[in-house]
């Protein structure tokens, strides 16, 4: 690879990752060759991981949090389902997980690798419909999932009602705030551990948290939930491991701490306000041009553009993805500034 450079973010509207915060980038470089998977040997990064979990707990309103820095939202979701499945051993031979249709495809992977049935309930106005979910819950349900910031439309499910449903039926409640988790504290949505009896949560520093990839987050209300994941590690100094991967990225852990120290809470609050205003502005501009827009809740705008328009924009270098229903998705990440959006609209006007 003759000095290949990573692609620039200037025209990337489809990504849930962004430029890392400068101190997160520097921390990632410093910790490149460390392995928090072996905390007995790599003690500094192990201590940093405890700090990362403390800080993630603050973001998600959980005092005394348990958890770890995962490789991403996928691993955190897989592990949450694994906790629920393992804790229900002896109670059911045919475990199932009930999730809204909007749940990320990582739950399909979780169901596949864990031998769990995934039941998806239809939505109502792009959010989980708790009555429809309740119909799918039965005695074999081990986990009920809510999404706080859906991948396609940025919607926030009614987490307290979902958590009540889980509790009433003896299942665990998992909230997937992989993307939304760093914006939601500055909104009036009920989504965190203080709002409801949530058991586990996915909240990813490498998305809106502005850490370097890979840095996902799994939080659990208490350490006993993680015990369901522990396996023995006979030849390491530490005697058990709860993570899915073995050797892990110390760069992700260190950069997560650096980003959260730099940005929690004021930096994230400022960015949430900026992104919310710019998403509203973009939605207004698109509506004024006659396009159908799914109004943003979190800073993600879905707009119905003709196929040929999306293709023409892609040819001009814009990286745009589509929802399953076909709308173009514009994720207003920190690199997607008003200037970027203005340039996008100018190109949209040119190609129409
Ligand atoms: N949960 C939610 C709500 C997500 O949106 C995602 C990823 C995950 C879990 C899984 O997280 P990891 O990808 O960290 O394992 N959502 C985006 C998606 O799949 C991820 C993404 C990121 C896509 C950057 C593109 C991209 O450039 O669409």
Image: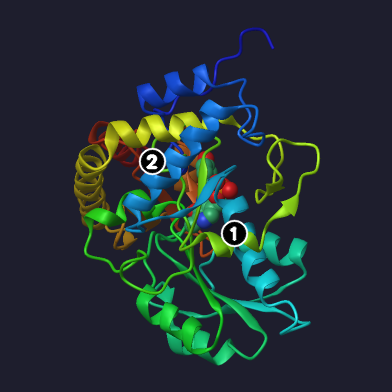
Picture disc at residue 62: none
* Quadrant of res 271: top left
Give 11 or 93, whichever is nearer the viewer. 93
Please, is residue 33 above or below residue 79 in the view?
above
Describe the element under mark 2 as helix, strand or loop.
Answer: loop
Task: Judge the density around disc 1: few (<14), some (14-19), many (≥20) Cα neighbours within 10 Å.
Answer: many
Judged left or right of residue 147, residue 141 is right
Q: Residue at x 38, y 59 (%)?
A: 154
Give 120 or 83, whichever is nearer the viewer. 83
Q: Position of residue 239 (x, y in %)?
A: 71, 45
Q: Position of residue 38 (x, y in %)?
A: 67, 34
Describe the element under mark 1 as helix, strand or loop.
Answer: helix
Task: Judge the density around disc 2: few (<14), some (14-19), many (≥20) Cα neighbours within 10 Å.
Answer: many
Instruction: Look at discs 2 and 1 and give the one toward the viewer.
Output: 1
The alpha-carbon separation of the residues under discs 2 and 1 comes to 23 Å
On the image, numbered disc 2 is attached to which residue?
209
Q: Residue at x 51, y 18 (%)?
A: 29
Q: Position of residue 350 (x, y in %)?
A: 33, 36
* Quadrant of res 290: bottom left
Please, is residue 43 above or below residue 123 in the view?
above
* Quadrant of res 114: bottom right
Judged left or right of residue 164, residue 111 is right
On the image, numbered disc 1 is attached to which residue?
226
Give 188 or 169, whichever is nearer the viewer. 169
Decide if residue 310 is in sight here. yes
Q: Position of residue 7 (x, y in %)?
A: 51, 24
Colour treatment of the image: rainbow
First-in-chain label (2 vs 1) = 2
For the C terminus, the quadrant is: top left
> Is the distance from the Cβ of mark 1 to the nearest ligand 1 atom less than 8 Å?
no
């Amino acid at each position: 690879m003759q000095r290949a450079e990573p692609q620039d973010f200037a025209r990337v509207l489809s990504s849930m990752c962004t430029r890392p915060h400068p101190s997160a980038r520097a921390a990632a470089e410093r910790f490149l060759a460390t392995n928090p998977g072996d905390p007995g040997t790599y003690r500094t990064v192990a201590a940093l991981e405890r700090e990362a979990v403390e800080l993630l707990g603050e973001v998600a309103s959980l005092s005394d949090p348990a958890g770890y820095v995962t490789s991403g939202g996928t691993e955190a979701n897989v592990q949450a389902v694994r906790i629920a499945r393992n804790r229900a051993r002896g109670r059911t031979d045919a475990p199932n997980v009930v999730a809204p249709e909007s749940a990320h495809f990582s739950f399909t992977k979780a169901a596949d690798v864990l031998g769990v049935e995934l039941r998806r309930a239809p939505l109502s106005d792009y959010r989980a419909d708790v009555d429809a979910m309740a119909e799918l819950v039965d005695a074999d349900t081990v986990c009920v999932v809510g999404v706080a910031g859906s991948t396609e439309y940025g919607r926030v499910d009614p987490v307290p009602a979902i958590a009540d449903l889980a509790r009433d039926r003896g299942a665990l409640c998992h909230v997937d705030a992989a993307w939304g988790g760093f914006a939601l504290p500055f909104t009036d949505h009920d989504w965190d551990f203080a709002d409801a009896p949530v058991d586990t949560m996915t909240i990813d520093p490498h998305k809106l948290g502005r850490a370097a990839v890979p840095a996902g987050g799994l939080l659990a209300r208490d350490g006993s939930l993680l015990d369901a994941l522990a396996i023995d590690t006979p030849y390491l100094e530490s005697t058990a491991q709860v993570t899915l991967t073995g050797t892990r990225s110390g760069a992700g852990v260190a950069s997560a701490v650096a980003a959260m120290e730099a940005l929690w809470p004021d930096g994230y609050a400022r960015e949430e306000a900026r992104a919310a205003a710019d998403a509203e502005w973009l939605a207004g501009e698109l509506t004024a041009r006659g396009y159908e827009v799914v109004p943003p809740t979190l800073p993600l705008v879905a707009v119905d553009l003709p196929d040929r328009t999306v293709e023409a924009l892609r040819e001009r270098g814009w990286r745009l993805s589509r929802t399953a229903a076909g709308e173009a998705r514009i994720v207003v990440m920190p690199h997607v500034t008003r200037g970027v959006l203005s340039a996008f609209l100018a190109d949209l006007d040119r190609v129409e």
